[in-house]
Image (cartoon, rainbow, N blue to C red):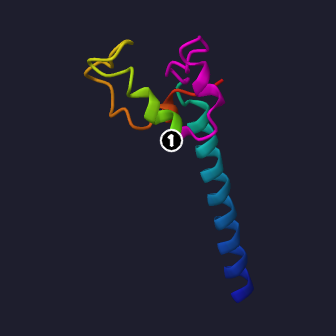
Amino acid sequence: MVKDIKTSKRKWLNIGFVVLCAALLIFLYLAPDETTTPLPKDDTHIEFHSIASKKEADKLCISCHVEDGDATPLPDTHPDPYRCLFCHKRN
């Protein structure tokens, strides 16, 4: 009798694990495509591709991408520009 209860619990645990894994796979499959623009590979941004530390490269982004900067300022809806390379991937 005790053995049947343990077998039953294990069976339901295994079924629950399979259902959880299936739900996770379906969730990941239905995830939207990445829409963030990658870091450009032009003369202006080429130095950012060679900087090993993302945090060091992020510090340089603000020098151009501010309201008074030389490049395109960030839109008002843009999140805080402290982790640029977290979203804008280097190729």
Counting labels gives 1
Answer with left or right where residue 67 lies relative to residue 61: left
| Foreground residue among 2 and 39 | 39
- Does 66 lie within the magenta span? no
- Quadrant assignment, res 18: bottom right
- Provide residue 41's location: percent of width, then percent of height: 61, 14
| Foreground residue among 37 and 51 | 51
Residue in the picture at 56% in, 30% down: 30
Q: Is residue 1 visible?
A: no
| Foreground residue among 16 and 1 | 16
Q: Which residue is mark 1?
A: 55
Question: Which type of secondary structure does the marked residue at label 1 adopt?
Answer: helix
Residue in the picture at 51% in, 41% down: 55
Residue in the picture at 56% in, 15% down: 40
Question: What are the residue bounds of the magenta stretch?
Answer: 33-54
Q: Amino acid at mark 1?
A: Lys
